[in-house]
Amino acid sequence: DANCGYKDFNKARYAIDRFKKLGLNVIEDPLLGSLEEYRALRTDGGVKIMIDVYARTLRDVGDVLLNGACDIINQHPCQQGGLERAKMVHAAATATGVPTMIGGTGFLGVGTAAFQTLASVIGLDFPCGELCGIIDHGFPRKIVKKLYSVKDGDSKIPDEPGLGIEIDEESLKSLSDKHFFEGK
């Protein structure tokens, strides 16, 4: 994920070509640029272009798809909405031949479970970015006792109340502000 780090199209194109030689097959949000420039980045059939930042609203998703600006849409439900929105994005994208994935920001293991469950409900044919992730975006640990099991690259979604996870109270306490719990 380049997080729109390249400000110049030619530098982005050069970097993507170099990354391709190193075996990279997908890059997310490489360029701070227009959708037309994103479409141009996809022309050689090499590294797939994944978009997140430019596809956070339904209108933006429509613009991305109409402009042929990506090969994959990475949905971040914590930034763009929940189940219904994710289903709408997935339906629109797959209708035009663009797969979607659920990825990023599965905070503390609870979000990991929620995002994996969301990915299974939508029926993605592209992986969930939170597949058994333990640490995400700088958090020092997870607060669930056990993450979903994975076998042959597939996550087993439990059929239990909640998300089928159990909170590790000691981990949670170590991350909490003790003043909050003491009423101060």
Image (cartoon, rainbow, N blue to C red):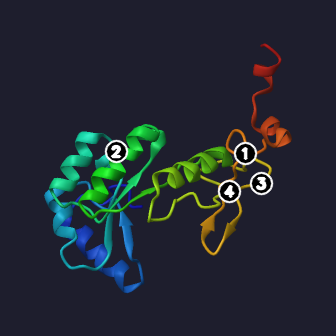
Give yes or no for contact between labels 4 and 1 (Cβ–Cβ under 8 Å): no
Residue extending farthest to the top is 183
Residue under label 3, please give it.
Answer: 146
Q: Left of 178 or right of it: where is 86?
A: left
Q: Is residue 99 visible?
A: yes
Location of residue 17 with respect to 148 vertically, above or below: below
Q: Nearer the viewer, mark 4 or mark 2?
A: 2
Type of amino acid under label 3: Lys
- State the residue in front, 88 or 179: 88
* Kind of element beneath mark 1: loop
Residue under label 1, please give it.
Answer: 160
Q: Earlier in the sequence, mark 1 or mark 2?
A: 2
Q: Nearer the viewer, mark 4 or mark 1?
A: 1
Q: Is residue 34 visible?
A: no
Give yes or no for contact between labels 2 and 3 (Cβ–Cβ under 8 Å): no
Q: Which numbered marker is on residue 134?
A: 4
- State the residue in front, 80 or 89: 89
Q: CA distance from mark 4 to mark 2?
A: 28 Å
Q: Earlier in the sequence, mark 2 or mark 3?
A: 2
Q: CA distance from mark 1 to mark 3?
A: 14 Å
Q: CA distance from mark 4 to mark 3?
A: 10 Å
Type of amino acid under label 1: Glu
Q: CA distance from mark 2 to mark 3?
A: 31 Å
Q: Earlier in the sequence, mark 4 or mark 1?
A: 4
* Kind of element beneath mark 2: helix
Give yes or no for contact between labels 4 and 3 (Cβ–Cβ under 8 Å): no
Q: Earlier in the sequence, mark 4 or mark 2?
A: 2
Q: Left of 70 or right of it: where is 76?
A: right
Location of residue 79 with respect to 119 vertically, above or below: above
